[in-house]
Image (cartoon, rainbow, N blue to C red):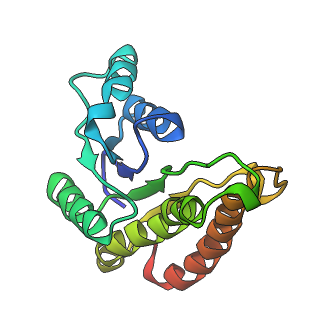
Amino acid sequence: MTVGCPSAFVTGCSSGFGLGLTVELGRRGWRVLPSMRDSRKRTALDSAWAEAGLSGNPDIVRLDVRSPDSARTAAEAAADRLGGPPDALVHCAGYTTLGFFEDLTAGQARDVVETNLLGTMEVTRAFLPGMRSRGSGRIMALSSNAANVPHPMFAAYAATKWGLEGWAEALAMELAPFGV
């Protein structure tokens, strides 16, 4: 990890946990790079940043977690802006489509899986070489109570969160020898 001011790259910062975590890390002195798919949705983050008494506006990185090219570009941008890989990669991007499973189209279910699970994997894949070469780093992926107590009309979402937890546990074992 970095000596001095730690750094974090956070996904899904236009709302929710990503937005809140970005502001809290900023309050605690972290150098944080928030990301979002559509930077035109930065208004809520900018407002929360200012309300927290933080100076300027956060330096947003454009990222569509569903795109491997976007993930690679974001990892490169983060390394350039931070002078290396972030100390922490925090996955907050995600959403759900409310509906009974049989009423969801294949496209709706696929999009939830691609965003919540495969997108997290792809972004991690883009950041891992830098973290491994440095020999340190933390990766955090937000899960949900839906992994423990699934609810009707959230089947696709619950599936992604169960998958995310299994993937994260296996990844932790794979990366421990590399300090990540």
Quadrant, the N terminus: bottom left
Image-quadrant location for residue 134: bottom left
In the image: residue 118, left or right of residue 10: right
Residue 162 against residue 171 in the figure, above or below: above
Q: Is residue 78 left or right of residue 116?
A: left
Residue 25 shown left or right of residue 36 in the figure: right
Residue under the point 53% across and 39% down? 17
Q: Is residue 12 left or right of residue 85?
A: right
Image location (x, y in percent) of residue 38? 30, 42
Tally of marks: 0
The image shows residue 68 at horizontal and vertical percentages of: 32, 71
The answer to whether one can see residue 96 in this image is yes
Above-or-below relation of 84 to 12: below
Foreground residue, 73 or 56?
73
In this rendered view, identify the residue nearer to me: 31 or 36: 36
The residue closer to the viewer here, 32 or 145, is: 145
Residue 131 visible, this angle: no
Using the image, determine if residue 50 lies above or below residue 83. above
User: Horizontal and vertical percent for residue 153?
Assistant: 77, 50
The residue positioned 49% from the left and 85% from the top of the image is 177
Instruction: Give the residue displayed 56% in from the left and 48% down from the top.
Output: 95
User: Residue 65: horizontal and vertical position, in percent?
Assistant: 39, 60
- Quarter-wise, where is residue 73 in the image? bottom left
Residue at x 37% of width, y 33% of height: 26
